[in-house]
Amino acid sequence: MNHAQLTHLGRALRLLGEHGEALTGDTSDAKLHEVKADLRRALELLDENVTAPPATRCAEHPNGPVDEAAPDRCLLCETRRRAARRAEFNGPAPHTQNPAASAPSRYGTRADRPQPQQRWLCELWNGQEWQLCGTPRRDRREAELYLAALRRGSRPAMAYRLVHEFTDYEVLRIWGTPVKTDIEPLGNL
């Protein structure tokens, strides 16, 4: 029985139960004829579903979907057999090669994450804090040459530093002495 057939049969049997509870000694003949019709309807539903032969000749899915071309008329089993035959010729399906990767991880895999990159950051002391000057460099020698050019420039900063960035930060070298300067005249008086 499928779900719809079970629902109809259950509804008919519940109606008969209500009729049984409502029966008394003075129940009218019209009401008894109504009970008789409902009882016949429930029996017909039961006869249709119980005496009907299974849709398929499959022991696993007797009332499953039908495939006329299958030897046991079972679409579910025939689909499984077709997949097995395809695997003989084409090899296993890609998702069956690694069963652990059947569902994508919400965090990605190691190959999805970018590799850590090392950069050299040129920074200058602006009187309050270290600030980036120029673009980060991929080559340390190039970064040092850039800082040397800034120190020889017309308006050099009080101090420069070279920071190595490789998943973390490490100060490699500092030129000059950073001194905290107050930006307010007369010392914030």
Image (tube, helix red, strand yellow):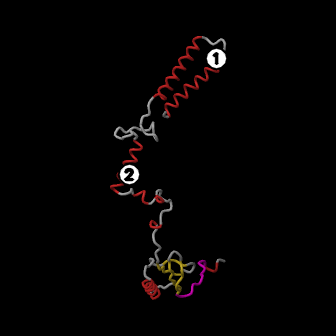
Q: Is residue 155 above or below residue 107?
A: below
Mark 1: which amino acid?
Answer: Leu
First to last magenta residue range: 175-184
Q: What element carries label 1?
A: loop
Q: Position of residue 68 (x, y in %)?
A: 35, 37
Question: What label does residue 118 carry, if any?
Answer: none
Question: What label does residue 84 carry, if any?
Answer: 2
Q: Position of residue 110 (x, y in %)?
A: 47, 67
Q: How many labels does the image show?
A: 2
Mark 2: which amino acid?
Answer: Ala
Q: Residue at x 57, y 17 (%)?
A: 35
- In the picture provided, is 171 more to the left or to the right than 56? right
Predominant secondary structure in magenta? loop
Which quadrant holds the C terminus? bottom right
Q: In this view, does 23 lie above or below 144?
A: above
Q: Mark 1 points at which residue?
A: 23
- In the picture provided, is 129 more to the left or to the right than 95? right
Quarter where residue 24 is shown: top right
Q: Residue at x 45, y 65 (%)?
A: 112
Task: Return the disc, 1 or 2, that comes first in the chain's sequence.
Answer: 1
